[in-house]
Structure formats: C-alpha cells, structure tokens
Amino acid sequence: MGTLEGHLLPGSFFLFYSLYYSVLTSLALLRGQRFLRPPLPPREKRGHRWWQLFPVEGVVKIVISLIGIFPEFFYPLGVSRLRMVDWEDPRRPFMFKDNWQHVTMYGFFLLSGVVDIVSQACQARQNMKLERAAEALAFFVLVLMMGSHIENKGTLEIRVHVLFMVPTFLVSLVLTIEVWVPDQPQLWVLKTWMGLVLSNWMLHFSVLLYVPPSGQPWRAENPVDLAFLTIFFCWHLGLAAAMLAAVYGLCSLWHHRFSSWREASGNKYELCPTGEGSPELERLTAGGPLQDRGI
C-alpha cells in the first residue's frame, strides 16, 4: 500500500462502497423503511441458484481484500515478504512491518466478507448482528493499524493519517451502535457521510503524497502547508455532504417517477412491514408465506 496504486485501490473501494450505501440510505429514507436493509427471507424461500444464495457485497469484500493482500507479499514479481522474523539475525528482528500492517487491515475486511457469506448463504436465517459486528471490527482494526502506522513517520504523513482516522473511527462507532440499534436513520446518514469523507480524503492524500499537482512535494516543516491540510479536510466534509445530497436528490426523482408509474399502472407501491412484532415479518422469519400485499 506504500505506493500511489496501493492507496488508490482501497480508496476507490471505499468510495464505491460509500456511494452504494448512499443509494441504500436515500431509498430507505424515501420509502420510510424501518431498517436500512430488511432481513432476508429464510434460505429455502430465496431460490436455489448460486447467485441468489451468495451475497454480492461479501464477495466484493473478499475479492478486493485478496487483490490488496497479494501485492503486499509478492510485488514486484519475484519478491516474497511472507517472513515475519529474520531468523538469520541473532536478534530475531521483525521484518516488513508496513506490509504486515496493510495485510492485517485487508484481512479483517476479508473476514467481514466471509461472515456476510456465511450469514446469508450458509445459515438458515440471516444473522445481521453478526454481519454488523464483523464490519465494525474491520473498521476498528483499520483505526488501530493507522495509529501504529504513523509511528516514526514525518509530520506530513502523521497529519494526513490522523485526519483519516477521525471519520474511520466514527464509521466503526456507528457500526457498533447499529449492532443493537439498527433502526435509526440518523445513524445511517452519519455512517454514509463519514464513509464518503474517508474515501474522498484517502484518494486526495494519495495524490498529495505521491503526485502533487504543483509538481513540488509538500513541505512538512512549513506550518502553512500543514494548515492547508486541515482546510482541505474540512472542505471534504462539505464535499461529502454535497455528494450525499446529490445522490438523495437523484434517488428522490427516481422514486417519485417510479411511484407515479406504479400508481398509473394500478399497482400501488407498499413496503412489507419489518417492524418488531409485525405479522408479515414473523411469517417471513418462520418460513411461512407472506401476505399478498403487493411489492
């Protein structure tokens, strides 16, 4: 990850993932859903084709994590960094600290993807609390690794990574709260907003550190340069809010147009109630047939 490409890969993944959650959050708010993602029906009710059983989100997490892990060990080609200890040195020092930190970060997101697949494809009923807990753990590990990653680094890298840790910690905190309180729209919005902030900031500081637009490296000893880092980060707070508002606006246009089309065709859009104790949800989780209430 210590290259421009190594930072662009996770940054692009986080941006795609945050935009995906922006759409989910916007549609959930427009539809008045109780949960951001309603629980899946029992396994026997989902169909038997493999693409109906394997969650795309979990597969994407695993694929992106593996793409990030292999270069840490084997790039450039012919290099192997699998050794953690130099056994030839009598002091037995640890080796490749940065690479093992990056692999640990990727590894816990890979674990989150595995938990998603096991919960949704291998169990009779989806365990949403376990999925949220695994995702929260991955973000907490990311914060911890960032905290140790900046040791013995320059002032510029420390400032950049500390600012990155702020939204990352907030995302992990919201995910932890959602394990017990998943039906709070304010938390959905905060999580999505901070996800956009951390992804945009990661892409931005990748450019700042490796290919500055001015052609001149940032001067860590200059307090003015460091001050502008914080200024740019604050701009990203506004940019992420604008992106979320834009996604909400586009989803609102689509939602109202789709609802109008449904009403014109004689079928009124209605959500299946997913609140606690609703008869439909009890029938769904029990494996019984849902009431015929439309889409």
Image (cartoon, rainbow, N blue to C red):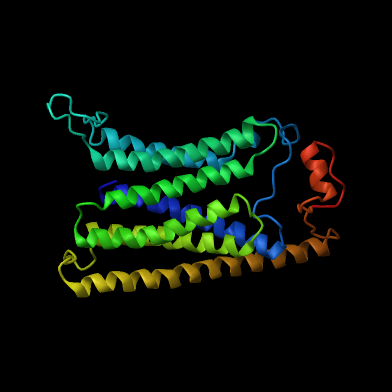
- Give percent across and percent down for residue 239: 44, 70
Nearer to the camera, 30 or 274: 274
* Residue 200: % across, % down: 40, 61
Position above or below: 66 against 264: above
Whether residue 271 sits left or right of residue 57 in the image: it is right
- The number of callouts visible is 0
Q: Which residue does the image show at 35% across and 37% down from the upper left?
A: 69
Could you say which is closer to the camera, residue 246 or residue 130? 130
Q: Residue furthest toward the top?
A: 88
Is 149 placed above or below 166 here? above
Instruction: Let me know if residue 8 appears in the view.
Output: yes
Position of 186 relative to 287 (above/below): below
Lateral position of residue 231 relative to residue 140, left or right? left
Front one among 81 and 12: 81
Q: What residue is drawn where x is 61% and y is 44%?
A: 129
| Residue that appears at 34% across and 63% down | 163
Q: Quadrant of residue 187?
A: bottom right
Taking 77 as reference, is 237 above or below it?
below
Residue 47 image offset from top left, x and y in percent:
72, 33
Q: Is residue 109 left or right of residue 72?
A: right
- Residue at the location (71% across, 66% down)? 257
Q: Quadrant of residue 269?
A: bottom right
The quarter of the displayed image where residue 213 is located: bottom left
The image position of residue 235, as x and y in percent, is: 39, 73
Tell me if residue 50 can be seen.
Answer: no
